Amino acid sequence: MARYDYRCSACGNVFEVEHGMTEHPAVACPACGGMADKVFSASGIKFEGSGFYNTDQRNGGSVTPATSAPEPSSSGCACENCPHA
């Protein structure tokens, strides 16, 4: 069960109602009995600090250098799709 905020369209009272996520009940205001609508608000999650943006790893940092292709083995192959690999 989740808790949702509802606002009465008649008196403006804001209150919580607990119901399942898939339920869409008709909700009446506990103060005046008027019909209420679900209030949508911003999430309580706030991303701060480094590591949340694609620009955080630019200009050095913990980026590892790319590795080169494997050296050819004694059989002359580079071990890409090689049966002995």
Image (spheres, rainbow, N blue to C red):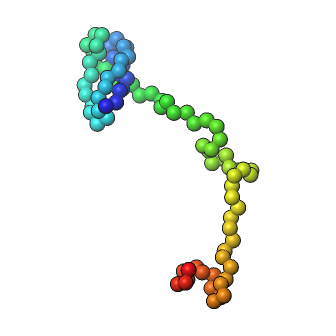
**What quarter of the picture does the C terminus occupy?**
bottom right
Residue 55, horizontal then vertical, whole percent: 66, 47
Please indicate, yes or no, whether residue 37 appears anywhere in the rendered image: no
Report the residue at 45% width, 27% height from top: 41
| Image height of 72 relative to 61, above or below | below
45 horizontally vs 23: left or right:
right
- Pick the residue in front: 79 or 16: 79
Q: Which quadrant of the figure has residue 21?
A: top left
Residue 58, horizontal then vertical, whole percent: 70, 50
- Pick the residue in front: 10 or 77: 77
Report the residue at 30% width, 10% height from top: 31
35 horizontally vs 81: left or right:
left
Residue 69, horizontal then vertical, whole percent: 66, 74
| Image height of 25 relative to 80, above or below | above
Residue 38, horizontal then vertical, whole percent: 35, 25
Q: Which quadrant of the figure has residue 77?
A: bottom right
Q: How many marks?
A: 0
**What quarter of the picture does the N terminus occupy?**
top left
26 horizontally vs 63: left or right:
left
- Pick the residue in front: 65 or 26: 65
65 horizontally vs 53: left or right:
right
Q: Residue furthest bottom?
A: 75
Please indicate, yes or no, whether residue 35 appears anywhere in the rendered image: yes
Report the residue at 26% width, 18% height from top: 28
| Image height of 70 relative to 62, above or below | below
